C-alpha cells in the first residue's frame, strides 16, 4: 500500500473510530480535520464526505478498514502506529466511550488472530493498559 493510500485508510479508520459511539464530538471533528490536513488527504474525494460527516460510518466498516490498513502480515510497528493514532482521537474529547475501548480491544484480538509474536502481543497489551490508566486518571 502506498503512503497516500495508507494515509487515506488511516483517516477513514479514525473517522470510523469517531463514529463508533454513534456521533462525532466537536473535539474529535477538529482532531480529524487537523490530521487529514497533516496527511495531505483532506481534499481527497473518498475522504471529504466522511470528514464532513455526510456519510455515517458503521463499526463493521471501521473494522474492515482496520484489516485493510494492517494487511496480511502486520508488524508490531503497524499496530503501535494504529493504536497511537486511535488513542489520540479517543482522548481528543476527554471521554472514552465503551465502544471506543472495544475498538482498542479488537486491535489486540486482531494481533492474536494474526499469530503475532509474544513480544508484539505484550507490547499492544501494555499500550492498551496505558490508555486505560490514562483514561481512569482523567475521570478522577
Image (cartoon, rainbow, N blue to C red):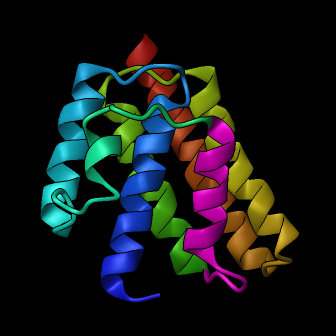
Which region shows up in magenta? Answer: 59-75
Relative to 60, residue 75 above or below = below
Residue drawn at (80%, 56%) of the image? 109
In this picture, residue 97 sits left or right of residue 113: left
* Residue 74 among those drawn in magenta: yes
Q: Depth check: 52 or 117 in front? A: 52
Relative to 31, residue 78 above or below = below
Residue 76: give x, y in percent of width and height. 60, 78
Residue drawn at (35%, 43%) of the image? 50
Q: Depth check: 67 or 76 in front? A: 67
Q: Quadrant of the C terminus?
A: top left
* Residue 22 among those drawn in magenta: no
Quarter of the image where one finds residue 112: bottom right
Residue 61: give x, y in percent of width and height. 62, 47
Residue 124: give x, y in percent of width and height. 64, 61
Q: How many marks?
A: 0
- Dominant secondary structure (helix, strand or loop) of the stretch shown in magenta: helix
Relative to 119, residue 109 above or below = above
Quarter of the image where one finds residue 55: top left
Quarter of the image where one finds residue 67: bottom right
Q: Depth check: 135 or 66 in front? A: 66
Residue 44: give x, y in percent of width and height. 23, 63
Residue drawn at (73%, 56%) of the image? 108
Residue drawn at (14%, 63%) of the image? 38
Relative to 43, residue 14 above or below = above
Amino acid at each position: 500500500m502506498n503512503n497516500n493510500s495508507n494515509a487515506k485508510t488511516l483517516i477513514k479508520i479514525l473517522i470510523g473510530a469517531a463514529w463508533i459511539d454513534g456521533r462525532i464530538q466537536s473535539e474529535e471533528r477538529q482532531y480529524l480535520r487537523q490530521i487529514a490536513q497533516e496527511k495531505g488527504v483532506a481534499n481527497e474525494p473518498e475522504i471529504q464526505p466522511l470528514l464532513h460527516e455526510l456519510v455515517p460510518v458503521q463499526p463493521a466498516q471501521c473494522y474492515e478498514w482496520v484489516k485493510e490498513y494492517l494487511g496480511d502480515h502486520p508488524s508490531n510497528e503497524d499496530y503501535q502506529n494504529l493504536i497511537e493514532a486511535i488513542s489520540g482521537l479517543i482522548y481528543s474529547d476527554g471521554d472514552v466511550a465503551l465502544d471506543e475501548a472495544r475498538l482498542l480491544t479488537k486491535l489486540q484480538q486482531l494481533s492474536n488472530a494474526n499469530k503475532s509474536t509474544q513480544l508484539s502481543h505484550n507490547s499492544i497489551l501494555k499500550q492498551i493498559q496505558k490508555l486505560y490508566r490514562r483514561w481512569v486518571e482523567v475521570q478522577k
